[in-house]
Amino acid sequence: HASRRIREEIPNACGSALDLRGVVEKFADDSKACDVLSAVRRAWNATTCDPSNKLSERELADTMRIFTECWIAENLTGSALTDAQVAYRVSRVNYKEVKVCMTQLASWSRKNYWEPWGDACRAMRDEIMKKTDGYYHTYAQVFRGLDLLRLQATTGVRNMVNNGESQVTLEDAKAFDADLRKWMVTCWTSNGL
């Protein structure tokens, strides 16, 4: 059931290990659940580690959600992925909590070091709030977005220092990056993310 649904709902998965045709062909109905889960885990790893993988993060997550729904519908137990993988790469974002996190990030006390900080946080928050129409569907995507935002801010501060456009020193810029990392972790964890 899962293989058919995946091919119907996620056409990009066709031809990848995650279309699960290989798993279906390899295992009979009387196969052990642990063997099937191991094969699905290998398919996940093969697809996510393949540099030519054509599936988006959203399609990867949807594929594993479909598999899990079908697995549970058959009254089977266990999971092909670890809890951490499911939480990070498969679970849908709690948009309300992420919105609060992004609002807190924008209000950071050291935001004046890099003027575009507040606008950049708001732009990311607005994209997240597009929900299914936006880019951010998994926590992996949000986390990567935050890391890119931090990199832009840190690079912006360092460029101002290098260009002599700021009273901030290079040591201040390094401290800025360290403090920003801490602030992101604080905002992330205080919102249960």
Image (spheres, grey):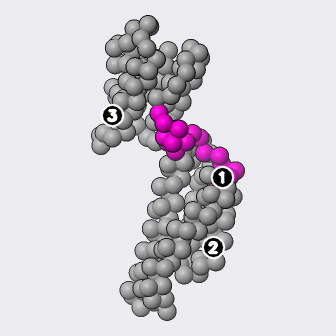
Q: Is residue 150 above or below residue 67?
A: below
Q: Residue, x 50% and y 15% (percent of image)?
A: 1
Q: Mark 1 = which residue?
A: 192
Q: Is residue 120 above or below residue 53?
A: below
Is 176 or 52 nearer to us in this picture? 176
Q: What is the x, y in percent for residue 121?
A: 59, 65
CA neighbours of label 2 inside 10 A, class few (<14), some (14 to 19), many (20+)? some
The label number, if any, that marks residue 155 in the structure image: none
CA neighbours of label 1 inside 10 A, class few (<14), some (14 to 19), many (20+)? few
Q: The magenta stretch spans which residues?
A: 81-99
**Amino acid identity at mark 2:** Trp
Q: Mark 3 = which residue?
A: 46
Q: Is residue 174 visible?
A: yes
Q: Residue, x 36% and y 35% (percent of image)?
A: 45
SS under mark 1: loop
Disc 1 vs disc 2: Cβ atoms closer than 8 Å? no
Q: CA distance from mark 1 to mark 2?
A: 19 Å
SS under mark 2: loop
Q: What is the x, y in percent for residue 73?
A: 59, 17
Q: Is residue 166 above or below residue 142?
A: below
The prevailing secondary structure element of the residues shown in magenta is: helix
Is 97 or 30 nearer to us in this picture? 30
SS under mark 3: helix
**Amino acid identity at mark 1:** Gly
| Numbered disc in front, either 3 or 1 | 1
Q: Determine whether, in the image, residue 42 is placed left or right of residue 172.
A: left
Q: Mark 2 = which residue?
A: 108
Q: Is residue 89 magenta?
A: yes
Q: What is the x, y in percent for residue 85?
A: 48, 40
Q: What is the x, y in percent for residue 164?
A: 41, 91
Q: Determine whether, in the image, residue 144 is placed left or right of residue 51.
A: right
